[in-house]
Amino acid sequence: MIGAGMGAMAAAARLAVAGHRVAVYERTATYGGAVARFERDGFAFDTGPALLPLPAVYRDLFVKTGKQPLEECVELVQVDPASRHIFPDGTTISVPNASRAGVVDALNTALGSGAGDRWGDFLVRAREAWDRTRRPLLEEPLWPDWRVLAEREPYPAVPHKRLLRTHRARTLDEIAAWELRDPRLTALLDGHALAYGLDPRTTPASAAVLPYMEHAFGTWYVMGGIRELARAVYERCLARRVEFVFGAEVTGIVEKDGRAAGLELADGTVTEADQVVAGLDPVRLHGLTDHPLRDDGDVRPDRESARPGRFTVLLALRGRRESGAAHRTIVHTPDRTAELDFVSYLSDTDEPVRPTVTVLRPDDPALRPDDEHESVVLSAAAPVEIDWSADRTDERFADLLVTAAEAAVPGLRKRLLWREVRTLQSTTQETGAADGALPQPALAAADGRFLHPANTTRLPGLYLVGGWAHPGGGLPHAGMSGALVAGLIVEGPGFRGSQ
């Protein structure tokens, strides 16, 4: 197995339980891939995903691979409120966790009568899109006739009369304009897209499943940080006798008799294998073999469209976290068009603009030296093809994130001890992903541009796992990719997913 990301480890544990001998070769010194941690002076920070949607995926992994359930291996807590939002006009709202009725009431109170009802009606339609796509896009191997998923928009948009013709929303942007009809609700919807680096103006309406997942299944935090989830999965792999080799750079996939038969390492070592599972981004993967892995009939994500990444600023603060502080606050951009143009490479300049900023303030003693200090993580979507080191672009963009975060963290600048700026190149170093790009979950419609390659490849014996393969990016999707790959190897091509 190549790589020790979350999807690869999920596959490794399941395969080991099924009786396979599994060895994982990881080029870095640790496991977890994007689920990484930074530590300094007694402060600790999650540098990748920081919250866990749809924890049932990992509950299933632990049930299927051992006697100890997930809750005995990590401490899971629901985040309530799920998020606090600060809009450019000064309006603020706290969104309850996993309560559609509570969300409707909160939005009606904060944004005016009718706003919450429109959002609630949107969530009902989003649920229908979820019901239509959950199995094919999360729980089953990619269909051979995947074009059915590419051509059909599962979101049941409300008919909209425009220029004497009836139209239905095809993008998140059109949902916002025609069905939500409030710039603050638009910002709320935008936030779910930007969390994955998606531009709502071009993202299919089927992405309505992203806010639905959060509202329906709740937002969860792992005490000690999401890195603790990676630790628990790693330890489950060790308990199932999975072997890990760290600092092992894979430089080639060995082929024999027309199938994948092993790995070649940077030190010249060759190891044989009956099956090879690769948790790599497409650029690195194609550098390991000359064998064509796809043909013209396979899914080909739109690589012409830029895939943004995540820019992060870690803040070490003096002073106690105030009572009642929200775990997650989203400070929305004052200029939506400028932000989306910047993220999507449509701006005439590389000059950073103030983005939508996610402010994470977990009340977790494990992440701070003592209760008189606080660790805070700021993040925003950002384009990958920028020279962040030129003209202090990274520091200037970080300043914009800190300025936005002042609305969420009282006395932030006076409390600041130090900050650590992490550009997209930091993501590349940890995950190997080209340019630090962020994989998004698989989405239906849009001619298949938001689907991901199948877990099987045109090279027999080679399987793909993790965020750059079906069903795409995100912690739940990584866990499901591991389940799908393990099922395909154990049960063969007739495997049809979890029941």
Image (cartoon, grey):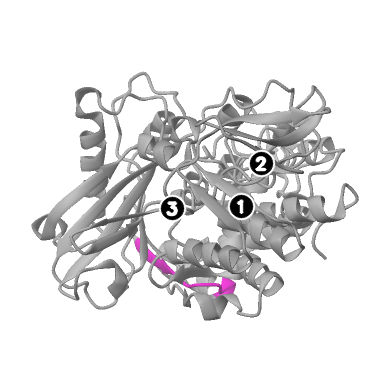
For label 3, the residue is 184
Corner quadrant of residue 128: bottom right
Q: Percent from the top left, x then y, of residue 110?
A: 40, 66
Labels 1 & 2 near each other (Cβ < 8 A): yes
The residues colored magenta run 92-101
Decide which of tag 1 and tag 2 comes sooner along the chain. Answer: 1
The disc labelled 2 sits on which kind of residue? Answer: Ala
Residue visible at 50% across and 31% down? 267
Q: Percent from the top left, x then y, of residue 244?
A: 54, 53
Report, in whole angstroms, how far the alpha carbon at label 1 lies from the one at label 2: 10 Å
Residue visible at 56% across and 52% down? 474
Neighbor class of circle 1 (other Cα within 10 Å; few <14, some 14-19, many 20+) is many
Tag 2 secondary structure: loop
Labels 3 & 1 near each other (Cβ < 8 A): no
Tag 1 secondary structure: helix
For label 2, the residue is 469
Q: Is residue 458 visible?
A: no
- Is residue 330 left or right of 439 when viewed as pictured? left
Q: Percent from the top left, x then y, of residue 141?
A: 79, 48
Decide which of tag 3 and tag 1 comes sooner along the chain. Answer: 1
Q: Is residue 93 visible?
A: yes
Q: 419 or 249, which is in the foreground?
A: 249
Outermost residue, front direction? 269
For label 1, the residue is 7
Q: Would residue 100 be counted in the magenta stretch?
A: yes
Q: 170 or 132, which is in the foreground?
A: 132
Q: Percent from the top left, x then y, of residue 35?
A: 46, 54
Residue visible at 52% across and 49% down? 245
Tag 3 secondary structure: helix
